[in-house]
Amino acid sequence: KPLALPGAHVVVTGGSSGIGKCIAIECYKQGAFITLVARNEDKLLQAKKEIEKHSINDKQVVLCISVDVCQDYNQVENVIKQAQEKLGPVDMLVNCAGMSLSGKFEDLEVSTFERLMSINYLGSVYPSRAVITTMKERRVGRIVFVSSQAGQLGLFGFTAYSSSKFALRGLAEALQMEVKPYNVYVTVAYPPDTDTPGLAEENKTKPLETRLISETSSVCKPEQVAKQIVKDAIVVTMGLFRTIALFYLGSFDSIVRRCMMQKEKSEITDKTA
Ligand SMILES: NC(=O)C1=CN([C@@H]2O[C@H](COP(=O)(O)OP(=O)(O)OC[C@H]3O[C@@H](n4cnc5c(N)ncnc54)[C@H](OP(=O)(O)O)[C@@H]3O)[C@@H](O)[C@H]2O)C=CC1
Ligand SMILES: CCCCCCCCCCCCCCCC(=O)[C@@H](N)CO
């Protein structure tokens, strides 16, 4: 049941920096082929060089793709097609491209709400939408969403950021219910503050309250966070909240399975009729 990473094709959005880059390295160390997706080409090439230092055989490839994950769906679909032509169908997609901006609700521009919803939410919808059909057809696939602790708990200063990260949980749970019969697994990571260029950028404009709240827990290393995210994606287990909802989810899942069987049965009778 665990996904075999050796030889697998792993796509990491936001793979040129911070947590995403460390996820790419972690998968590469385990023998995967990597596609890095981000906008800035220099940062992509720099990350590619760094990742390649960790190769375990001479067949492994790191492919770089420069695209904005939330600008235009057709663009995203096209680059995923290109990546699949070069490295084969995507076995695992890690949606790590994202950003944070903080400030009191009344101080944030409304455009900030649009921007964060676009990059953090739609920027995960587009790549996932582009890989899901092939994953379902092959009955193989993992999709990872990188939310945040601020995606479990709404926190001072994070009205725009928290809501964009909460959205990922709704997306992930609904999608998981749809694709489970096809052996595709969806996981969500909720990392704490992690030492990355993104966090350094965010800290420049953090309100005092947000900073003090954040300082109650310590800053993690991106390598450590990445390791956990990859582990959780390979061997999917159940968290506490999921266990409580187990009864409901189990019965909903069986409805979904029943419908799928019904649909397959009627397709067969349609063909024979
Ligand atoms: N660091 C932290 O404390 C925490 C971070 N997170 C989440 O983890 C993820 C990664 O964070 P972190 O490593 O700090 O981020 P970084 O800022 O270090 O890296 C962000 C990556 O995303 C890419 N990216 C940003 N916008 C786009 C876009 N529109 N299209 C394509 N690629 C894009 C960047 O490349 P480029 O700019 O070239 O496009 C870069 O590769 C984010 O979703 C963040 O919200 C969650 C909890 C804590
Ligand atoms: C059951 C839930 C556990 C809750 C633990 C409480 C933790 C409070 C501190 C929160 C720190 C804020 C993290 C945001 C990180 C982030 O996403 C940005 N740094 C991105 O750049």
Image: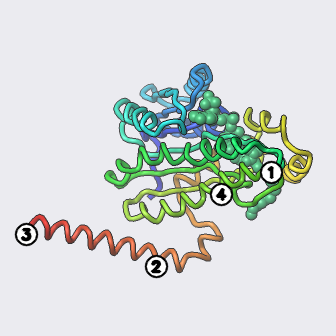
Front residue of 237 and 207: 207
Q: Is residue 64 left or right of residue 254?
A: right
Measure the alpha-carbon separation of dots 3 and 1.
Answer: 61 Å
* Three-letter residue code for mark 2: Ser
Q: Indicate yes or no: mark 3 CB to ligand 1 under 8 Å.
A: no
* Three-letter residue code for mark 1: Phe
Mark whose residue sits in front, 2 or 3: 3
Give the residue pinned by disc 1. Answer: 105
Q: Which mark is residue 2?
A: none
Measure the alpha-carbon separation of dots 1 and 2.
Answer: 40 Å
Q: Is disc 3 surrounded by few (<14), some (14 to 19) or many (20+) residues within 10 Å? A: few
* Three-letter residue code for mark 4: Phe
Give the residue pinned by disc 2. Answer: 251
Disc 1 on helix, strand or loop?
Answer: loop
Disc 2 on helix, strand or loop?
Answer: helix
Report if the CB atoms under discs 2 and 4 are less than 8 Å apart: no
